[in-house]
Image (tube, rainbow, N blue to C red):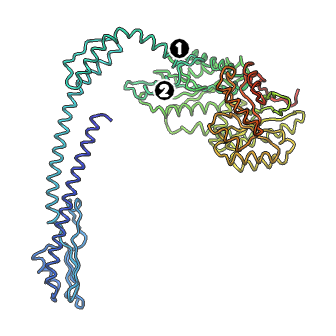
């Protein structure tokens, strides 16, 4: 809040409190006057204790000294002597009655009847209201005088500030004119002197500054894999659009690399980097004639670009061309699904949150539509949930059709006494046979409460695969959602179905993420216990990312922990990772838990981890994931 608004607010509060204080004093004075009026009345009526005439005469007598709002005399035995004047409720309440509230009522028993009155408050309230009105006039007048004076002073002050702002705005344009200090008065004059002093120094050093700034910007704002600008630059550009006074319009395109996690698992991180680099190349080629000067990598698998001064209909040509490049690239690699795209319009002062939500929704719809598809959402009409609805339908369809296939990746034992297994990776596809991004399927299934049905399908499919193909030997790891493993209804179902397949269940290792299991240690302990009852085992994935890891696996006691791949990455040269892995291995051995290192992609990493006595190794260097065969070779 600026100084001007702050001053106005403070002044308003001060005068408001002053007015309230005056009102409070007048209100108290009025109450005192009312109390005196009632006391006078009581004193007068106490002198009439022997009254035995009718009520009307009594009213006329008292009216000579008092004004009544309400008067009622009720004789004990003769109703003809009763008399009533006025009413307790005011039918024509005046403004001052709304400001000041007071009631001057009194009830007294006389020898032959009962008298109830309410004195008129007008004479009491009127004086206080007049005083309050005068005070309010003075307060408002003083407030206006101060506000006008302050506004005049601020106007003069702003002139000096505007001159300084204009001067500073011209500094980036290298227009180093001398500061006219005569235009700056009072507290602004030292600023003018300081600007004039720094003008010469800034002018001589501006060249070197730009050179250094360019080097830093390239390092801080450029993604090394794709050469695109980073998320920070993207956020800055989004802010410039939302705050721009200049008329702007165009389209925002979001491109999601659908299979990054799959490629990292199947072929390693280097293949994943090459995949991202190729997608970036496709985006550049597709936008070559659109006048795009900057591209963004906004997350590990998401890209974005703005195309200025075109409509959505014109921007669709970019998406068509981009899809053609993706399809062309898909013919040279093992996967058919390269990326999905979404496009939305933007204009000046757009709500950035709504814009990104709509763009993500467009990508979500494209992901459920097929290979390398795109989708366009043109209007902000509350369709932000449209993409989720598409996912809900798609996941229900793939569950009903059992649309999944398994890849397998073996784990290498580090000694012959360790019983390891092959991990199964579920891959999903839609009605057209197109692969769906696994991470998105799992995330959307949890959002829509379909994760239990999805995990049931995976478990049933695994049991059918192993029972129908007895030549598949050894143990197999099955990935299930932590949110399912923590729910008693799923655990009961899993225990029952595994009980009827005892020989097969003894070959299964259920892999669950550490972060999900830590949400409820009691439920995690129950899941491990129930799996042990039917002969199955439990492995905790991505171990080591949470702060409570050691306490967690000490209480839950899984059979296997799989270190997060970040521990293996460059461990041969990272002493911190070596220290943590040694500590984890030592503690695990003491309580009988096996440790498997994942993400092993180089020989140096393998040799280092073997020396640290882990029980097993998994990663691209050990073996690539492959489609599971019906029999072992």
Whether tag 1 and tag 2 are in contact, CB under 8 A, the answer is no
SS class, disc 1: loop
**Location of residue 246 by image quarter:** top left
Residue shown at the point (87%, 33%) measured from the top left? 472
Task: Residue at the far left: name it.
Answer: 64
Q: Quadrant of the N terminus?
A: top left
Q: Is residue 40 left or right of residue 169?
A: left
Would residue 429 be found to the left or right of residue 81 on screen? right
- Image quarter hosting the C terminus: top right
Q: Does any portion of residue 227 appear in the rendered image?
A: yes
* Residue 198 image position (x, y, % from top left): 31, 14
Mark 2 sits on what residue?
Answer: 235
Residue 543: image location, x then y, percent: 68, 34
In the rendered image, residue 500, in percent from the top left (x then y), is placed at: 85, 48
Whether residue 371 is visible here, answered yes or no, is no
According to the picture, the residue beneath numbered tag 1 turns out to be: 289
Query: Is 427 above or below relative to 268?
Result: below
Residue 488, how many percent across, how many down? Answer: 71, 50
**Measuring 83% from the left and 37% from the top, which residue is drawn there?**
465
Which residue is outermost to the bottom?
77
Front-lying residue, 62 or 432: 62
Mark number displayed over residue 335: none
């Amino acid at each position: 809040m600026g100084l001007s608004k702050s001053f106005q607010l403070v002044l308003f509060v001060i005068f408001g409190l002053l007015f309230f204080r005056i009102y409070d004093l007048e209100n108290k004075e009025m109450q005192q006057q009312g109390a005196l009026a009632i006391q006078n009345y009581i004193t007068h009526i106490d002198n009439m204790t022997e009254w035995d005439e009718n009520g009307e005469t009594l009213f006329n007598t008292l009216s000579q000294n008092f004004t009544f709002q309400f008067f009622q005399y009720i004789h004990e035995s003769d109703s003809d002597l009763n008399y009533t004047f006025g009413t307790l409720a005011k039918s024509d309440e005046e403004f001052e009655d709304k400001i000041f509230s007071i009631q001057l009522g009194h009830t007294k028993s006389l020898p032959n009847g009962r008298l109830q009155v309410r004195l008129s408050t007008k004479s009491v309230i009127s004086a206080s209201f007049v005083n309050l009105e005068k005070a309010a006039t003075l307060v408002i007048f003083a407030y206006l005088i101060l506000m006008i004076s302050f506004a005049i002073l601020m106007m003069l002050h702003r002139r000096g500030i505007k001159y300084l702002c204009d001067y500073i705005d011209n500094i980036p344009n290298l227009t180093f004119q001398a500061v006219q200090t005569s235009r700056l008065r009072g507290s602004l004059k030292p600023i003018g002197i300081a600007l004039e002093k720094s003008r010469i120094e800034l002018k001589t050093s501006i060249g070197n500054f730009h050179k250094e700034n360019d080097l830093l910007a390239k390092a801080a704002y450029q993604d090394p894999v794709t050469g695109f600008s980073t998320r920070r630059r993207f956020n800055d550009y989004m802010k410039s659009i939302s705050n721009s006074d200049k008329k702007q319009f165009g389209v925002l395109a979001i491109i999601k690399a659908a299979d990054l996690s799959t490629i990292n698992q199947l072929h390693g991180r280097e293949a994943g980097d090459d995949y991202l680099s190729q997608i970036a190349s496709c985006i550049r080629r597709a936008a070559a004639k659109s006048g795009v000067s900057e591209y963004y990598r906004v997350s590990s698998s998401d890209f974005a670009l703005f195309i200025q001064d075109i409509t959505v209909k014109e921007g669709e040509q970019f998406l068509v061309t981009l899809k053609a490049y993706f399809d062309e690239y898909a013919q040279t690699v093992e996967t058919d699904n390269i990326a999905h795209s979404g496009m939305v319009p933007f204009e000046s002062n757009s709500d950035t949150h709504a814009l990104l939500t709509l763009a993500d929704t467009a990508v979500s719809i494209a992901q459920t539509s097929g290979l390398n598809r795109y989708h366009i959402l043109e209007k902000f009409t509350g369709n932000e949930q449209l993409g989720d609805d598409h996912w809900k339908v798609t996941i229900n369809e793939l569950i009903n059709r059992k649309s999944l296939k398994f890849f397998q990746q073996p784990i290498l034992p580090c000694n012959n006494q360790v019983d390891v297994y092959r991990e199964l990776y579920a891959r999903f596809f839609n009605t057209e046979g197109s692969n769906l991004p696994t991470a998105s399927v799992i995330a959307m299934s949890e959002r829509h409460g379909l994760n239990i049905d999805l995990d049931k399908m995976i478990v049933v499919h695994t049991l059918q695969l192993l029972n129908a193909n007895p030549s598949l030997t050894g143990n197999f790891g099955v990935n299930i959602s932590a949110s399912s493993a923590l729910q008693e209804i799923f655990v009961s179902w899993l225990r029952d179905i595994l009980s009827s397949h005892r020989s097969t269940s003894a070959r299964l290792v259920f892999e669950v993420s550490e972060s999900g299991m830590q949400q409820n240690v009691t439920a995690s302990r129950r899941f491990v216990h129930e799996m042990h009852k039917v002969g199955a085992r439990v492995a905790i994935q991505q171990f080591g990312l949470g702060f409570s890891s050691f306490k967690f696996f000490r209480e839950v006691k899984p059979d296997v922990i799989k270190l997060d791949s970040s521990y293996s990455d460059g461990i041969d040269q990272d002493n911190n990772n070596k220290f943590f892995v040694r500590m984890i291995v030592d503690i695990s051995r003491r309580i009988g838990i096996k440790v498997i290192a994942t993400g092993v992609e180089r020989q140096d990493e393998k040799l280092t981890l073997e020396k640290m006595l882990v029980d097993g190794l998994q990663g691209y260097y050990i073996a690539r994931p492959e489609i599971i065969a019906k029999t072992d070779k």
